[in-house]
Image (spheres, grey):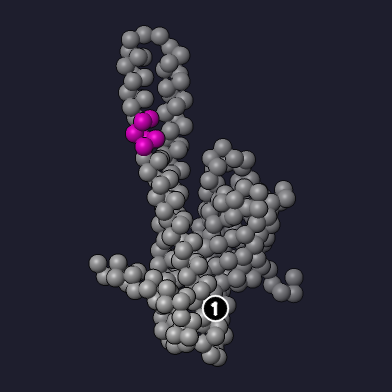
Amino acid sequence: MKRILTTLWIVALSLVFAGYPGLAKDRSTLEAVMEVEQTLLTEDLQKMRILFSDRTQVELQLRTMYRTLSAILGSSGEQNVVQAELIYRQIEGAEASRRLIFAAQQALVGRVIDRKRKLDLMDEQLGGAGPSEEIESGPLSGTWRVVLMPREQNGAFNLVQTGTLISGTYTLAGGWSGSLQGTMVNRKVYLVRIDSKLGRSMEFEGVISGDGGTISGTWLNYDLGGEGGAQGQWNGTRVKREE
């Protein structure tokens, strides 16, 4: 109940700011609302990561079950008929799970977009609420040389971190480029790759080193049949300015 009331309060304040800009001059109130909204956004992005992982597992199971069903149907015998019926019922259950996960993903994406719009609105209001100290860039801000394994694909991430939120652009060998969005909480990094050709195509998880010079972790490809495999490891090294 407390979470619901907090969310309703944020939405109400956002509507007030949108309709009456003159009321949004209290910097401390704006900053407090933005901090809560950014926390909720971080939680939603973490939920999205879990849903993507769940969907990947279901799709891997479906792929195996369909191959098994095809092999059984290609054989003769009453026992094979019974096995085919059992496998098909399992497939129906897995397909139902995949549809539910996809519906949850759709709702979550809409919620994330809505949160980002509200944050943009409040950021605009904050710009007109008087002078304040400049927000310090986070430890992920800068250029990173990255390598995706086992495909040994080289590239570069150009990142900007504000608070827990991360945005940026990337280039990867093979002519791939696009944008990155994500979060960093307690040195744990989560990024979503939005390719200029493929759209949302991959996610990265990792941990930044204590000295802030390297990142290492795992990647997951949303297209399970895509080039380079479905998952692997990656690492990044900060590029110093003089380089």
- Inspect this view and state whether residue 198 appears: yes
Q: Is 77 left or right of 67, judged from the image as shown?
A: left
Residue drawn at (26%, 70%) of the image: 2
Residue drawn at (54%, 74%) of the image: 162
- How far across and how far down the image is residue 190, in percent? 50, 61
Residue sitting at the far top: 77
Residue sitting at the far left: 1
Residue drawn at (52%, 72%) of the image: 120
Q: Is 132 left or right of 26, judged from the image as shown?
A: right
The relative height of residue 188 versus residue 138 in the rendered view (above or below) is above
Residue drawn at (73%, 50%) of the image: 175
Question: Circle 1 is placed at which residue position?
Answer: 124
- How far across and how far down the image is residue 154, in percent? 68, 54
Q: Residues within 10 Å of mark 1 (few under 14, many from 20)?
A: few
Quadrant assignment for the N terminus: bottom left
- Inspect this view and state whether residue 27 appears: no
Kindly state the secondary structure of the residue where label 1 is placed.
helix
The relative height of residue 91 versus residue 236 in the rendered view (above or below) is above
Q: Nearer the viewer, residue 239 or 111?
A: 111
Write down the quadrant of residue 46 in the picture.
bottom left
Instruction: Name which residue type carries label 1.
Output: Glu
Residue 93 among magenta residues: yes
Residue 197 among magenta residues: no
Q: Which residues are magenta?
A: 91-96
What secondary structure is the stretch in magenta mostly built from?
helix
- How far across and how far down the image is residue 25, in percent? 47, 87
Residue sitting at the far right: 243
Write down the quadrant of residue 243 in the picture.
bottom right
Residue sitting at the far front: 19
Q: Is 134 left or right of 188, judged from the image as shown?
A: right
